[in-house]
């Protein structure tokens, strides 16, 4: 893994859609081998297909997002990565249509930060009980040995850590 952080701005302009008639849509896609999303997420094999549609309340974003993100195995605690695939659906509201604190508003300059959105969705889509491999043996509860690497001899007491 390359530890050098590749910061690529993922801002995109949706301002041009505001004057389009309701129902107008535009498709786009984005593929990046590696990207660092502020403040803390490195993503590999990012693949996004998305559509912006002009709707009555603002701009509707529908996307299919996938990317590989860092994950720690709950059994052996090793650092690994996991592929997350998730649909996205969000409306960016005209400022006067914003009703709740969680509503996304169309920024004044018309540029939205897709990175922030992708980050949220990828982290939410991450499996809660991630295991590095289906037969991961976990760590020994007696001595802490990674049982995938070596059998420490405490096998009778072995309990696979499940969280
Ligand atoms: Zn593991
Ligand atoms: Zn042991």
Image (cartoon, rainbow, N blue to C red):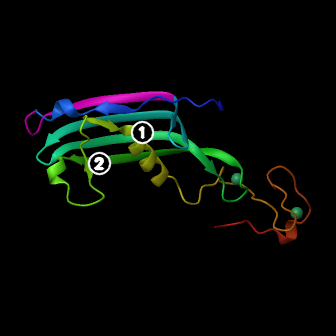
What stretch of residues is rendered in magenta?
20-33
Q: Looking at the rendered structure, which numbered label has been put on residue 115?
A: 1
Which residue is painted at 40% across and 32% down in the image?
Answer: 10
In the picture shown, does residue 126 fall above or below 67?
below
N-terminal-most mark, 1 or 2: 2
Residue 139, quarter of picture: bottom right
Q: Are marks 1 and 2 in contact (CB under 8 Å)?
A: no
Which of the two residues, 108 or 18, is positioned nearer the viewer here? 108
Q: Position of residue 40 (x, y in %)?
A: 55, 44
- Give the spatial CA distance, label 1 vs label 2: 15 Å
Which residue is painted at 36% across and 38% down in the image?
Answer: 113
Position of 87 with respect to 78 (left or right) is left
Q: Is residue 96 magenta?
A: no
Label 1: how many Cα within 10 Å (few below 14, some 14–19, many 20+)? some
Q: Is residue 29 magenta?
A: yes
Looking at the image, the residue that sits furthest to the front is 108
Looking at the image, the residue that sits furthest to the bottom is 157
Callout 2: SS = strand
Q: Nearer the viewer, mark 1 or mark 2?
A: 1
Q: Position of residue 42 (x, y in %)?
A: 55, 38
Which of the two residues, 30 or 134, is positioned nearer the viewer here? 30
Which residue is painted at 32% across and 41% down in the image?
Answer: 63
Looking at the image, the residue that sits furthest to the right is 153
Q: Quadrant of the C terminus?
A: bottom right
Residue at the disc numbered 2: 89
Q: Position of residue 44 (x, y in %)?
A: 54, 34
Q: Position of residue 3 (x, y in %)?
A: 65, 32
Position of 128 with respect to 158 (left or right) is left
Which residue is painted at 21% across and 33% down in the image?
Answer: 15
Ligand 2 falls in quadrant:
bottom right
């Amino acid at each position: 893994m390359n530890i050098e952080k590749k910061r690529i701005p993922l801002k995109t302009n949706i301002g041009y859609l505001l004057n389009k008639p309701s129902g107008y849509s535009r498709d786009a896609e984005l593929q990046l081998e590696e990207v660092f999303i502020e403040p803390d997420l490195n993503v590999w094999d990012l693949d996004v297909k998305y559509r912006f549609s002009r709707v009555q309340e603002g701009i509707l974003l529908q996307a299919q997002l996938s990317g590989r993100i860092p994950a720690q195995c709950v059994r052996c605690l090793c650092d690994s990565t996991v592929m997350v695939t998730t649909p996205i659906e969000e409306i960016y509201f005209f400022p006067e249509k914003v009703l709740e604190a969680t509503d996304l508003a169309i920024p004044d300059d018309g540029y939205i930060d897709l990175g922030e959105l992708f980050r949220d969705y990828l982290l939410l889509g991450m499996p809660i009980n991630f295991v590095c491999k289906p037969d991961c043996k976990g760590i020994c509860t007696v001595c802490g040995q990674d049982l995938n690497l070596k059998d420490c001899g405490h096998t009778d007491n072995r309990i696979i850590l499940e969280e």
